[in-house]
Image (cartoon, rainbow, N blue to C red):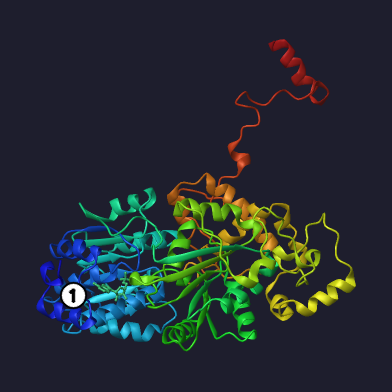
């Protein structure tokens, strides 16, 4: 099939030719004619399938005829991350070059003034992250009742990031008569429920199997102790022909540490995570895209949507907490049929996370073969003990780097000697909390790892990337997180989504009607449990009773 068969205008076809595309991708073949017909679309498609052009190209033709009004955009595209939103806007510029359409990009971390000015001029297409869009709406800078086409991109990511309440609010502000295009990389029950809410009689389109890794990606797994991870990474980077690579960490804090460490070891590296100022994020990304930097250490904020061609490698410095993120991360390489390489560093503590990934892939990740790595490799079922016990790298301040309580600590002299070969202590000193909180991880390594990681995925008040700012008291957070997770089990999906709304102090707030008194989101257990099993309180012991009442009782019986 050719682009010319899809019903696009000559101007749009010219832009497609200018972009160098010869044939439409499967999602484009399916979606473009349906969108042009004005029908809703429910698309299951990952990035890398040509999904953006599948909605941008027909939208350009749909919008070509109309006129803009100040502060009343005619179409709206919502994306979970700033980078993805910016990328969609690049696509609009590329494909809309022969049309006089105006566009505004509303993302957090950029000046309100410029965005407000663009809105005042009137725009055909508004591309936004949910938080910033609502901010501008609440400031009265934007009216959404003229939106004729709505695109919700990466809906599953929005759900993961806790943005769904914002998205629901945005959709409630739009006219009911509109065309909605809803894209998600996965389509589980929760996403389907959302789609049912937002779409009317949609055409369902699937571009590829759900969450599968491209066949062009060579995958490899290596299991090392936590303390050896950075050394293992360096050896891999030196042994393999790494032209450029994304290196994913689960935590923002670890992105910073690893970035500094790699820089110190002479690698050409930049870093990116959701707590960085937007200008820095843009700068880092631009350096990586242009090839000025070879390595990008990042959190999952970069796992989706980023379209950088010719990335030779992806390294998971941590096994991702959500198995699906594995597929998104490694999808940064091996794009558009090219070969790519995706390596994962696991520790013996990661068995459960790894099992989830391999279940999703429906295959085990093969072992990675690197010549000089063997001495670091450990069995997946060995204990992930710290450097002092194993005789390496050992200040042992990191959460997983401390020896379990049952282990004998190394003699002081040995520890001092090991410190010389360890990673930059300053980095750890700056980033790690007080050691007293650390043993928690060893008492229940699997559980704790999962809970701690889950915290990193909680949405933050200040970031529209759904990342949680780092906390100083990790031990306390672990306990709080445990409580939260226990409570979460009894919540429905709506409640789970609601808890992500935070007040200006960063405290999670539940939304209830005026007639409800809320106890921080939960009815305390003591109010729910009847200690007397519905039979009423038993009489007090005879010696405690008022003699007069005692006499009455005996008369009554
Ligand atoms: P996306 O899935 O939208 O992130 O697109 C992934 C990449 O595929 C982008 O770099 C697009 O420029 C490119 N692309 C989109 N459509 C086509 C096409 N029909 N032929 C070749 N490349 C395409």
Towards the viewer: 258 or 219? 219
| Image coordinates for residue 462, horizontal then vertical, percent | 50, 72
| Image coordinates for residue 408, horizontal then vertical, percent | 86, 59
Image quadrant where one finds the N terminus: bottom left
Q: Which residue is mark 1?
A: 60
Q: Is mark 1 within 8 Å of ligand 1?
A: no
Towards the viewer: 121 or 347? 347
Q: Reply above or below: 101 against 448.
A: below
Q: Quadrant of residue 56?
A: bottom left
| Image coordinates for residue 112, horizontal then vertical, percent | 39, 82
Towards the viewer: 223 or 484? 223
Q: Is residue 138 visible?
A: no
Q: 531 left or right of 120?
A: right
Secondary structure, mark 1, is helix
Q: Is residue 534 visible?
A: yes
Q: Reply above or below: 433 against 363.
A: below
Q: 30 left or right of 348?
A: left
Q: 118 left or right of 11?
A: right
Image quadrant where one finds the C terminus: top right
Q: Quadrant of residue 551?
A: top right
| Image coordinates for residue 536, horizontal then vertical, percent | 64, 25
Q: Residue at x 26, y 69 (%)?
A: 144
Residue extending furthest front?
371
Figure quadrant, ligand 1? bottom left
Q: Quadrant of residue 239?
A: bottom right
Q: Residue at x 31, y 66 (%)?
A: 49
Q: 542 left or right of 465?
A: right
Q: Residue at x 21, y 69 (%)?
A: 24
């Amino acid at each position: 099939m050719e682009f010319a068969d899809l019903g696009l205008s000559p101007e749009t076809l010219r832009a497609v030719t200018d972009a160098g595309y010869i044939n439409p991708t499967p999602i484009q073949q399916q979606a473009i004619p349906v969108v042009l017909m004005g029908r809703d679309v429910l698309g299951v498609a990952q990035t890398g399938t040509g999904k953006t052009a599948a909605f941008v190209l027909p939208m350009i033709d749909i919008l070509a005829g109309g006129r803009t009004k100040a502060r009343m955009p005619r179409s709206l595209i919502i994306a979970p991350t700033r980078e993805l939103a910016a990328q969609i806007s690049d696509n609009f510029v590329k494909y809309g070059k022969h049309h006089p359409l105006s566009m505004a990009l509303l993302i957090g971390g950029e000046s309100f003034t410029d965005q407000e000015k663009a809105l005042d001029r009137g725009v055909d297409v508004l591309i936004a992250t949910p938080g910033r869009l609502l901010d501008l709406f609440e400031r009265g800078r934007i009216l959404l009742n003229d939106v004729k086409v709505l695109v919700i991109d990466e809906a599953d990511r929005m759900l993961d990031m806790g943005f769904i309440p914002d998205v629901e609010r945005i959709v409630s502000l739009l006219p009911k008569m509109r065309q909605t295009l809803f894209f998600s990389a996965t389509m589980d029950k929760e996403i389907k429920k959302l789609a049912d809410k937002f779409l009317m009689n949609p055409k369902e389109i699937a571009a590829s199997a759900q969450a599968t890794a491209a066949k062009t990606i060579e995958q490899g797994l290596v299991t090392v102790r936590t303390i050896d991870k950075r050394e293992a990474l360096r050896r891999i980077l030196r042994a393999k022909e790494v032209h450029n690579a994304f290196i994913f960490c689960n935590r923002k804090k670890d992105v910073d540490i690893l970035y500094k460490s790699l820089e110190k070891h002479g690698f050409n590296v930049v870093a990116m995570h959701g707590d960085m100022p937007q200008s820095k994020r843009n700068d880092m990304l631009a350096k990586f895209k242009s090839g000025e930097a070879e390595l990008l250490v990042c959190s999952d904020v970069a796992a989706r949507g980023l379209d950088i061609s010719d990335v030779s490698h992806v390294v998971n410095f941590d096994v991702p907490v959500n198995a699906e993120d594995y597929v998104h991360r490694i999808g940064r390489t091996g794009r558009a049929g090219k070969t790519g390489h995706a390596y994962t560093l696991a520790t013996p503590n990661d068995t459960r996370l790894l099992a989830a990934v391999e279940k999703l892939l429906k295959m085990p990740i093969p072992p990675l073969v690197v010549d000089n790595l063997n001495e670091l490799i450990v069995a997946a079922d060995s204990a992930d003990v710290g450097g002092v016990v194993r005789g390496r790298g050992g200040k042992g301040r990191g959460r997983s780097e401390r020896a379990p309580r049952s282990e004998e600590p190394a003699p002081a002299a040995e520890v001092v000697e090991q410190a010389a070969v360890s990673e930059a202590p300053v980095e750890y000193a700056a980033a790690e909390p007080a050691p007293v909180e650390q043993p928690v991880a060893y008492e229940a390594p699997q559980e704790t790892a999962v809970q701690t990681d889950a915290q990193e995925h909680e949405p933050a008040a200040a970031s529209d990337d759904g990342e949680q700012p780092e906390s100083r008291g990790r031990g306390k957070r672990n306990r709080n997180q445990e409580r939260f997770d226990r409570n979460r089990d009894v919540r429905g999906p709506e409640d789970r989504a609601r808890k992500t709304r935070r007040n200006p102090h960063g405290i999670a707030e539940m939304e209830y009607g005026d007639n409800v008194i809320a106890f921080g989101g939960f009815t305390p257990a003591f109010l729910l449990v009847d200690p007397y099993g519905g039979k009423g309180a038993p009489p007090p012991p005879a010696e405690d009773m008022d003699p007069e009442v005692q006499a009455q009782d005996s008369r009554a019986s």
